[in-house]
Each structure stands twice: as structure tokens, then as C-alpha cells.
Amino acid sequence: MLKLDADHEEAHLGVGHVKVDGAWRSKSDARARELWKGKLEDMQSEFQGRPWALVAPVKTEYCDVKCSSTKDVEEKYVAFLAKALFPVYDAAFPQSKFKWHHQENGKIFLFANVGQFREYMLVPPGMGGFFNPETNEVYTFHGSFGIRGTTLHVLAHECCHVYQWKITKEMSACPTWLLEGMATYFGDGAKFRFSFRDKTSEFKASAIAIEPPYDRVILLKRFLQSDRWYPLDKLIVHPHFAFGGEYYSYGWLAVYWCMDGQKYGAHKGEGRKLLDEYLLHVTELTTKGGFDNPKHLQAEAEVFKGLVTKHLGKSLSAFDEELKRFIRELRLDPIGTWDRTNRRWKGLGLVLTAPVGFSVVDQKDMEAGEVAAFALPAREYPRISVWAQSNDFLARVDEKLLPRWVDGLYEVEGEKEIRKIEGGTWSEGAVEAVFKGKRQSAVQQTMRKGQGQQEQQDDSHATDSFSRVKDHPERIS
């Protein structure tokens, strides 16, 4: 009967269907939708938040926190910072060795949503947070970023600067490659064994692991392949005001090699000794604005070169070659799996079907920020890339957050076909699809080579600290 009349009431009731919002659904589907509706209302309340002026800061041992989301969200961020994150910094660089030159607490400002963040702080789209070294303040918002980043990752990056502020006499005297390398090490590399939705008792320093950040590693591999490597002797004298996105990856590599290279057999502990001695040296520097002073940076470069020779027995150029070898051989876990028979890629809750003639792009040839990519055999372009974008939500991986699914056609070299993506479709160049979790996915065809040679940079966290904001040069994002 339902085949003849899709809205036949008695037939629907006969098979156990119920009517919800004007549509017939199974009871299990109706219950799931009702459950999701309640969760969505809770999250909408989180992002509506409380009036900023009426929120009082919460004091902790390491920082003072002001959050304009709900009280429950505020409690979770306070617990995360006090019980998990700052103890991780303290364990890696303990006060017994790296004494605090400043005792004042850092101030962490967490806005309820991205709109409030931009309105109050006058920041452009794409920025997820920043640190102000003049006032020892971090600004960010309750949300999510890129493939798998959340506000927790933003805080892991930016609050590292708060910790650096504590252990340095003059933070702006420290070379930016070191400051940002450390922040990227903790921020991009953080893997949390707890969810933001878990009980705060689960927020522990022991539940935070540091791993190689996927997008940073992919970007460095791309630079190696294209012979665009930025040498170490230039990195260590690169001024703060010109420290753009790609340099964070190089800074991370130098710090990660020293901190964790021993696990890969890259050294036997001498890398950590090198980093510790140089960090102890820079924490005593007092030249205000030294990270933009060429003479100061050159003097610091000579100190670092000397320590490289002392601890590694190598020249700076030889150390640079070792970093190249390390990143070339570093293996990453794949994001998804590729079924050649059915021409399907699965990962992060997405199911993608490759167009006729296209194959999945190998991981080593991926661009920073790509979730998946398809290209013609032996050709890099035309290329179909799947990117992750912020949707300002936090949720578990089994929840769907995108309220609308897009239907349409995607054209590849004159061929028109519908490409199913988890209930949505690819549509005319840029499409929103469903990520089972906290992401949207944008599908786009990238430029052909020759139309634009600039490498697209990852802004999955949008927290490259010390990046400048127009009219606000003191900001460190």
C-alpha cells in the first residue's frame, strides 16, 4: 500500500510508524530524532551563552578563566586547564629546573561563540585564538576547527605561551622559532584520551599524549618533495614580525626531534639536553623585542650553533640534514581506507566514491589540510580535494551536527554525476556534507598547476601564535 500511497495513514500505523514533524518515521528513528533534538537544544544554549559583562573569572593555580558559555562548559574548561593542560607543561619543563620568573596568573578569555569572539576582539575570519604577551592573556572561543581540532587544541597551543611567559624574564627576547615550535608541539600534537563531554574527573595530564601533527608533517614532506625546504640557519634568525604559517611546522620539527626523537632512534637523549640548555639560556634573556632585532637574533643563532656542536657533534647544516631525514622517514597513520574494487574511500565518518578514471591520492602526496583527494593516474591536476572546516560545534564522533544536506551535481572535465557523501552530495565546486562528529567537509576542485603555485596552508586550528593582526600588531594568535 505504501508503494501506491506513501502517506497512507493506516498502512504506516500498521507497520508501527509514527508521525513526527509532518513526516512518517519508524519508532526508533523518531526516538533518535527526539534525542538529537534535545542535544541540539543543549548545544544551542552553549553557543548562546551568558552576557560577557556578567561573567566573573574563575581563579586556578596557573591561570584565571573567564568563559561566557554555560556554567557547565565553563567548569569543563577550568578543569581541563587546571587538572590536565598546565600540569603537562609543568611535567615537560618542571619548575625545579625552569624556575618561574613571573608568578602572575595568565588570563584565559573564552567566548561562547565565534561571532562574539570576532565582535569583541575585532579579529578576521580564520583566526581561532591568540595570545597577547603584553598582558599575558589568551583569547579564543567555544568551537571546533578543521579535521579534528577543538578549542582544547587551541588552548594547548596558546596556553603554552602563558607558561613560557612564566619561565622567561622577557618573552620577546626569545627567538620565535622556539616559542612557536614549543606551542605547536603541545597544541597541534595533543591527543586527548578524553572527550570534552566526559566527566571532568577524566581530565588528567596522563590522558594527554603528544604525537606528530598530521598536517604539519604532510606540509614538511611536501616541501621536501618540491625542493622548497627552508634551511635551519635561516629559520633561527627569522624575525617574529614575518613568522608566517609554514614556519610553525619547521619550529615544531626542531622541538619534536629534540623532545621525542629518542623514541625513533634519532638520538640517545642528547637532543633533549640541547633543547633544555638552550631554553635555560633564553629564559634569562632581557632584550625586549629581541625576536625582531637582527643583531640579537644573529647572536642567539651563534649560541644555538655552539650548543648543536656541543651536544650533537654536528654543524648546523648537518643537523638540518638530519631533520630532513627524520621527516622524510616519519610515518603517519592513514586518515582513511581505500577500497579499489568499489572505488570508495572511508574515513572520519565520510564515504566518498571516486569519479570514473580518478584514483585516491597517496598519503605522501596529500596537501596540508586535505582529508582525502582524487586525481587522474600519474597527474596531480585536475584534482578533487576534500577539506575540513570549522563548524563551531563540539560533540562526540557518533553525533551528526550539520542541519542541512546539500543535493546537486559536481562536474569533472565535462562529466556530470552525483557523488554520494553520507546522505549529501557533491555540488558545483564546493559542498557541505555530513561528518559524523564535529566537522563539516568542503569538497572543491583545486587549481590546475600554473594557475596558482602557492601552497595552500593548513588553518585547521587557526592558532599560529605570534601571527600579526591588522591594526593590532601586539597580538600573538
Image (cartoon, rainbow, N blue to C red):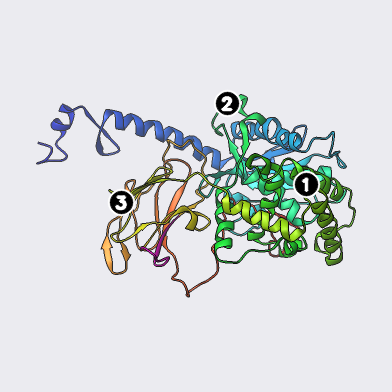
On-image quarter of the N terminus: top left
In front: 238, or 110? 238
Q: Is residue 400 left or right of residue 69?
A: left
Do tag 2 and tag 3 residues touch (Cβ < 8 Å)?
no
Q: As shown in the figure, which amino acid type bears the numbered disc 2?
A: Lys
The correct choice, above or below, for 13 with respect to 159 in the image is: above
Q: Counting residues from the N terminus, which is met first, the one under dot 2 or under dot 3? A: 2
Residue 380 falls within the magenta-colored stretch: yes
Q: What is the distance, in whole Å, between disc 2 and disc 3 at their CAs? A: 41 Å
Picture coordinates of residue 273, whole percent (x, y)? 79, 43
> Could you tell me which secondary element the residue under label 1 belongs to?
helix
The correct choice, above or below, for 424 with respect to 456 in the image is: above
Q: Residue at x 52, y 38 (%)?
A: 45
Do tag 1 and tag 3 residues touch (Cβ < 8 Å)?
no
Picture coordinates of residue 281, whole percent (x, y)? 86, 49
How packed is label 2: few (under 14 Cα within 10 Å), some, or many (20 or more)? Answer: few
Q: What is the distance, in whole Å, between disc 1 and disc 3 at their CAs? A: 47 Å
Residue furthest to the front in view is: 313
Q: Which mark is residue 275?
A: 1
Residue 137 falls within the magenta-colored stretch: no
Q: As shown in the figure, which amino acid type bears the numbered disc 1?
A: Leu
Q: Nearer the viewer, mark 2 or mark 3?
A: 3
Q: What is the distance, in whole Å, between disc 2 and disc 1 at their CAs? A: 36 Å
Q: Is residue 134 left or right of residue 221?
A: right
The magenta segment: 377-386
How packed is label 3: few (under 14 Cα within 10 Å), some, or many (20 or more)? Answer: some
The correct choice, above or below, for 15 with respect to 257 in the image is: above
Picture coordinates of residue 322, whole percent (x, y)? 67, 54
Q: Which mark is residue 199?
A: 2
Q: Mark 3 — residue?
A: 343
Residue furthest to the top in view is: 201
